[in-house]
Amino acid sequence: DYKSILTRKQFRANCGTYEENRDFVLTFATALMRYGAPPHRIQSTIESAGRCVGLSVTCCFIAVVSFISIRDPETDIHQLKIVKESLGFDLDRSLKTHRIYLKVYRDEISPKEGTKALSDLLGRRARYTWWQVSLWAAFCSFTVCPIAFSGSALDTLICFPLGFFVTALEY
């Protein structure tokens, strides 16, 4: 029903102050970039998050930097924020980021609570240590080499330590 959708959107726009909504969008952008959202989806997802909290958001994502233009349609306040975050990959925390966004989108929590939940998530330590991730990367290198690249037994033995060390260098 169109009227119920319109009413929900009006309710969303009034669920937080401009600062709370802006902080949610910026924290959400940081979490998306840090935990491995696909780069081609970051821009549209940030703009969608802005719409869901009642802001007019335009985003330009270039490598490790997002330029986010935020406008409050009610007060006509414009701000340009720059979010710089190295791109990472953590499926567990990426899924949790998406769940927090859905809770805000569905009005289960306010943008202020969403910002707090995302800030807590950003402050947590990684689930796996560097050597565990490096060991998994070494195992993957070992198994992918003969299957995908028709590597010999010697190639697979060389790929194991290389996979470990290249991943360890990232940490």
Image (spheres, grey):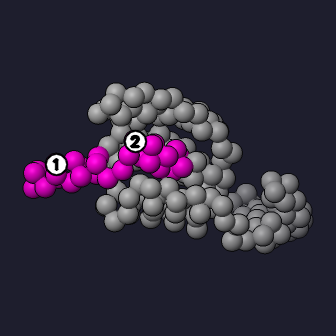
The C terminus sits in image quarter: bottom right
Q: Quadrant of residue 168?
A: bottom right
Q: Helix or strand or loop: what does disc 1 sit on?
A: helix
**Nearer to me, 99 or 130:** 99
Indicate yes or no whether the magenta region holds residue 149. Answer: no
* Secondary structure found at label 2: helix
Q: Main secondary structure of the magenta part?
A: helix
Q: Nearer the viewer, residue 14 or 65?
A: 14
Quadrant containing the N terminus in the rendered view: bottom left
To which residue does mark 1 refer?
Answer: 6
Pair 1/2: label in front: 2
Q: Looking at the image, which is closer to me, 23 or 132?
A: 23
Vertical side of 162 occupied by 20: above or below: above
> With 74 as the anchor, is 69 left or right in this view?
right
Q: Position of residue 120 (x, y in %)?
A: 59, 63
From the top left corner, tell me how far across and down residue 106 is, in percent: 31, 61
Task: Determine which residue is flagged by label 2.
Answer: 18
Looking at the picture, does residue 46 appear above or below residue 110? above
